[in-house]
Amino acid sequence: MALERSLHAKENRRLESRAGERVDYPFLVLVLLLLTVGLAMLYSASYAQSQYDTGYQISTKYLQKQAVCAAIGLAAMYAFSRIPAAFWYRMAWPMYAGSIVLLLSVLVIGEEVNGARRWINLAGIQFQPSEIAKFTMIVLFARLTRGFGQRAREFRFGVLGFGIALMGILVPLALEKHLSAIMLMGMVAVVMMFVAGTSPKWLLAGAAGAAVFVLIYITFMGYAGDRVSAWLHPEQDPGDTGYQILQSLYAIGSGGLFGLGYGKSRQKYLYLPFQYNDYIFAICCEELGLVGALAIAALFALTIVRGYWIALRARDRFSTVLAAGLVSLIAVQTILNLCVVTNLLPSTGIALPFFSYGGTALAVNLGEMGIVLSISRYRNQRKIQEEIR
């Protein structure tokens, strides 16, 4: 057995030392298209807000900041596309510890923005540690999946093992009252646990427990309860809790089949709150219409499907789960955001990847896609036969 592991290790080093295949070009093109369309729509959606915030001097305030982060993200994507997945396997635990420290530091030195303390400012650079924590959780779950092997079907490993690791991230987020991040990471964790082999009965039990928690939270936390009330009956309070939802629906409805035209949105003129952030898709619908909205949704769908295609053809278990987790993060965020904007779900505060304003999220998302591209380099090579435990 020791000889077999040694041979596998030599094979790993040999494959990593090779130049490898080219990255998956279809996936690369899809990601770049999402970024390009996202930046174009961000400029249109933030144009009026930028002028208002700068005394009608600058119309590209938000675009400029997003473009800088896009450049950083593209550099990270290229760099990460050259780094073998084994590097992230080795870095999983150090990154996990670092993420917990960053999340806890928010409670001490974090800056408050829009009533929430979730950001850290270092040398004038503001970033959100929760975005890094999402990535760290996925890497650690991928490593645990490889380590647990077939034992992931047992409660001790498939539930307690993953659950304890997840709570290390979720507890600091709960102290920050970052409910949207908790919900998002919990959903991605369930997907990864399913891929790892955790018994569906335990996942269903966990989902039931989460549903009970949400009901209790809504019952005793007025803020969350207001969101649900606004979701069910926004017309009952059009000037307060239902205002944002109604303005979003007005924007979507006024777009019609082909939209008002790029840059011609009316709701972005300070009618729709957060029109360049969580609700940017409503502006897309208003300006591009149903046809444009479906095209954007199709672009996301193609990117996600191609990402899963890469994950299925990865050369080892760790790479498969890592790629699947990173793609699932984009998929869950996209689905939740589109459902919120169209009022199919209560407001969650989850942004639309590659579109919504947020430098940390954009840079991290692009870096994560670089890792998927790195995994795609080995898509046609012989799969490594790992030891079954």
Image (cartoon, rainbow, N blue to C red):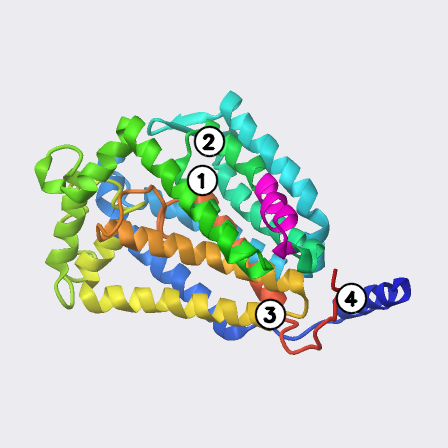
Earlier sequence position, callout 1 versus callout 3: 1
Earlier sequence position, callout 2 versus callout 4: 4
Magenta highlight range:
152-165
> At label 3, which amino acid type do we have?
Ser
Graded by Cα atoms within 10 Å as few (under 14), some (14 to 19) or many (20 or more), the crowding at tag 1 reads many
- Judge whether 315 appears above or below 239 on screen: below
Query: At 22% across and 33% down in the image, what residue appears?
Result: 226
- Judge whether 147 appears above or below 261 on screen: above
Disc ID at residue 12: 4
Residue contact at pointers 2 and 4, CB within 8 angstroms: no
Q: In the figure, residue 222 lies in which quadrant?
A: top left
Given this view, does label 1 or label 3 mark the residue nearer the observer? Answer: 1
> At label 2, which amino acid type do we have?
Ala
For mark 3, give the secondary structure. Answer: helix
Task: Looking at the picture, tell me which residue is in the foreground, 270 or 157.
Answer: 157
State the CA–CA distance, disc 1 to disc 3: 29 Å
**Residue that mark 2 sits on:** 174
